[in-house]
């Protein structure tokens, strides 16, 4: 096998390595992306906070209603006890009693509205928690599959790297150096195939004499246009 053939094989291995490395990067990016899970957790946290605030407000309303009811009871006892005989004082007490009852009615209406709101928040929270569990399960299953795939890809990459090392050791140092230099300069494509007397790296038609020299495989021949090493299968 000539150095040219080995360099062509080496490039195939390098391209495969690059593809496997990109796949690993893509897998790692997906594994690191917890945006959907974080969003679902945030939604649950917001609803839990909102529910706590509503329940605290409900307790405050209950306390207020209890306090007003206690005062109403005291006023009614005073009103009907017969101890107050002054008509103006009785009238004032009656008016104050009616105001307290009106206040209690407003508080009770607020409490009923709040209870309805709490019920809705509880339903929303249950739905959000169910969605969080669904997403967490889906993410766990996805990650398990990705980790399995990652292990497989990493194994393929390690094997390819080993194969590259063995093959590159068989290439003449000067030819390998030219290959590595071109690979860096030509975005990973140092060797260009010839098809129908055309360089596939730059799509330039090549002289037949040049193609024949490449096919002979005795020396490294470079494309006069793009400078890549030419290879004819």
Image (cartoon, rainbow, N blue to C red):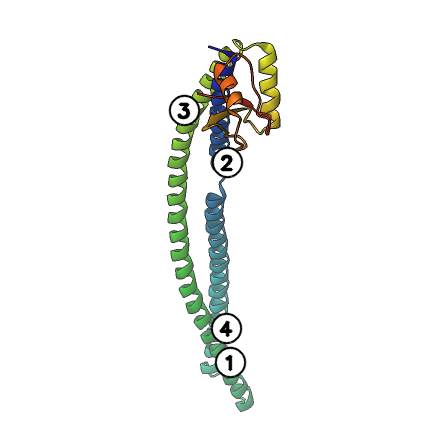
Residue at (49%, 41%) from the top-left corner? 34
Task: State the image coordinates of residue 220 (x, y, percent, origin top left).
Answer: 56, 16
Above or below, 183 relative to 170: below
Distance Cα–Cα, label 4 vs label 2: 65 Å
Which disc number belongs to residue 71?
4
Tell which circle, 4 or 2, labels the residue nearer the N-terminal end: 2
Mark toward the viewer: 4 or 2: 2
Q: Position of residue 122 (x, y in %)?
A: 40, 56
| Disc 3 packing (10 Å; few <14; some 14–19; many ≥20) | few
Which residue was labeled with disc 1? 99
Nearer the viewer's eye, disc 4 or disc 3? 3
Q: CA distance from mark 1 to mark 2?
A: 65 Å
Residue at the disc numbered 2: 29
Vertical order, 190 against 112 (above or below): above
Disc 3 designates what residue?
Answer: 152
Q: Which mark is residue 164?
A: none
What kind of element bears circle 1? helix
């Amino acid at each position: 096998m000539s150095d040219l053939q080995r360099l062509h094989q080496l490039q195939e291995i390098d391209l495969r390595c690059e593809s496997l490395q990109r796949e690993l990067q893509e897998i790692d990016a997906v594994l690191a992306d917890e945006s959907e899970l974080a969003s679902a957790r945030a939604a649950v946290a917001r609803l839990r906070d909102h529910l706590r605030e509503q329940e605290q407000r409900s307790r405050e309303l209950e306390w207020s209603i209890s306090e007003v009811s206690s005062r109403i009871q005291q006023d009614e006892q005073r009103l009907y006890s017969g101890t107050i005989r002054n008509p103006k004082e009785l009238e004032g007490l009656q008016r104050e009693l009616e105001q307290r009852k009106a206040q209690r009615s407003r508080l009770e209406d607020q409490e009923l509205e709040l209870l309805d709101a709490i019920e809705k928040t509880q339903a929303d929270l249950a739905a959000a928690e169910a969605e969080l569990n669904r997403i967490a399960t889906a993410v766990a299953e996805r990650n398990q599959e990705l980790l399995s795939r990652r292990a497989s890809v990493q194994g393929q990459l390690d094997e390819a790297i080993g194969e590259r090392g063995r093959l590159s050791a068989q290439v003449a140092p000067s030819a390998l150096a030219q290959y590595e230099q071109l690979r860096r300069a030509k975005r990973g494509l140092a060797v260009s195939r010839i098809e129908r007397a055309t360089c596939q790296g730059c799509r330039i038609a090549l002289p037949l004499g040049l193609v024949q020299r490449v096919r002979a495989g005795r020396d490294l021949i470079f494309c006069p246009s793009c400078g890549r090493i030419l290879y004819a299968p």
